[in-house]
């Protein structure tokens, strides 16, 4: 995927665009935009800013950010501000959130670390709580993956609503347009269906939970296999519980109707009920 800013954005360009920020440090550039850490002098707060490319689906993103600002959940990133900013002579959309100290799960995974069964249980509880809060606003995150989950003081926080989908705005996401990351799509998401629910996010979270518990992706990132094959068995040497394994298996069912319907059901499954 080509970078949205070519050549990549430099710190000095961001100082020009955000005069109230200091100590700017670029964290990463991805397919949608550039993420950087900075200090907000007006708020006396370290913040994370994401600047989207000028051709990003701005109307859809702005809608999701407005919905996000209405949600108060400790496991979902909070939006401080959002709007337009002039970068390289073009209007670009940006979001500003508190900077959370911690490593994303992808960093943990790439350094060959895993989560134990207790940490994996906490991961599922925390992020499914965030997913549930989004769903109360009829928003599906659509991009649950290790990169978008931060480990913060033994709890987990879901970040980045860059591809989230609001179910009340069918005109903004056309049928057949697939949003998300290969290797984590739910089967119905891969088909480009418009009537997604939180069960699509639960599926992706189940894949992440398996990956972080076992130490490798259950399908080796083969999205076609995920479309047709049930979750592979857990390795016998992995220390876990029947309740946790059963929860992950149900979360990754190929048919959405066979997955948990809400956060409360996930809690019951993790308790072995």
Image: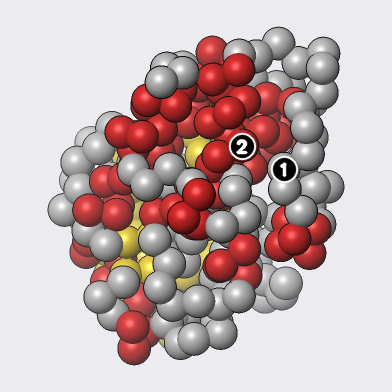
Q: Residues within 10 Å of mark 1 (few under 14, many from 20)?
A: many
Q: Is residue 79 above or below residue 267?
A: below
Q: Identify the residue at image location x=44%, y=77%.
A: 194
Residue at image location 78% in from the left, 39% down from the top? 232
Given residues 137 and 100, the one toward you in this image is 137
Question: What is the number of callouts on the image?
Answer: 2
Q: Position of residue 103 (x, y in %)?
A: 56, 30
The answer to whether the residues at label 2 and label 1 have Cβ atoms under 8 Å apart is yes
x and y percentages locating residue 221 in the rendered image: 78, 52
For the C terminus, give its image quadrant.
Answer: top left
Mark positioned earlier in the residue sequence (2 or 1):
1
The residue to which callout 2 is attached is 249
Figure quadrant of residue 196: bottom left
Q: Is residue 261 left or right of residue 2?
A: left
Residue 187, x across and y down, in percent: 62, 63
- Whether residue 126 is visible: no
**Residue 178 seen in render:** yes
Circle 2 crowding by C-alpha within 10 Å: few under 14, some 14–19, many from 20: many
């Amino acid at each position: 995927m080509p970078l949205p800013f070519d050549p990549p954005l430099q710190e000095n360009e961001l100082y020009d665009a955000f005069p109230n920020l200091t100590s700017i440090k670029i964290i990463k550039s991805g397919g949608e935009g550039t993420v950087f850490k900075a200090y907000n002098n007006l708020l006396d707060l370290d913040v994370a800013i994401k600047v989207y490319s000028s051709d990003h689906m701005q109307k859809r993103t702005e809608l999701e950010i407005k919905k996000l600002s209405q949600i108060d959940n400790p496991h979902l990133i909070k939006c401080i501000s959002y709007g337009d900013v002039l970068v390289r002579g073009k209007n670009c959309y940006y979001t500003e959130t508190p900077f959370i100290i911690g490593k994303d799960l992808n960093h943990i995974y790439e350094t060959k670390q895993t989560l134990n069964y207790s940490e994996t249980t906490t991961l599922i509880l925390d992020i499914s709580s965030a997913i549930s809060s989004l769903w109360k606003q009829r928003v599906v995150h659509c991009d649950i993956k290790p990169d978008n989950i931060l480990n913060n003081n033994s709890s987990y926080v879901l970040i980045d609503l860059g591809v989230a989908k609001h179910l009340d705005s069918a005109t903004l996401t056309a049928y057949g347009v697939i949003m998300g990351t290969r290797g984590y799509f739910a089967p119905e998401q891969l088909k480009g269906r418009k009537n997604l629910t939180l069960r699509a996010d639960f599926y992706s979270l189940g894949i992440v939970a398996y990956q972080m518990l076992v130490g490798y992706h259950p399908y080796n990132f083969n999205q076609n296999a995920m479309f047709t094959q049930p979750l592979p068995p857990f390795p016998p040497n992995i220390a876990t519980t029947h309740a946790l394994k059963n929860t992950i298996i149900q979360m990754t069912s190929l048919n959405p109707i066979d997955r948990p319907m809400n956060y409360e059901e996930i809690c019951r499954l993790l308790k072995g009920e």
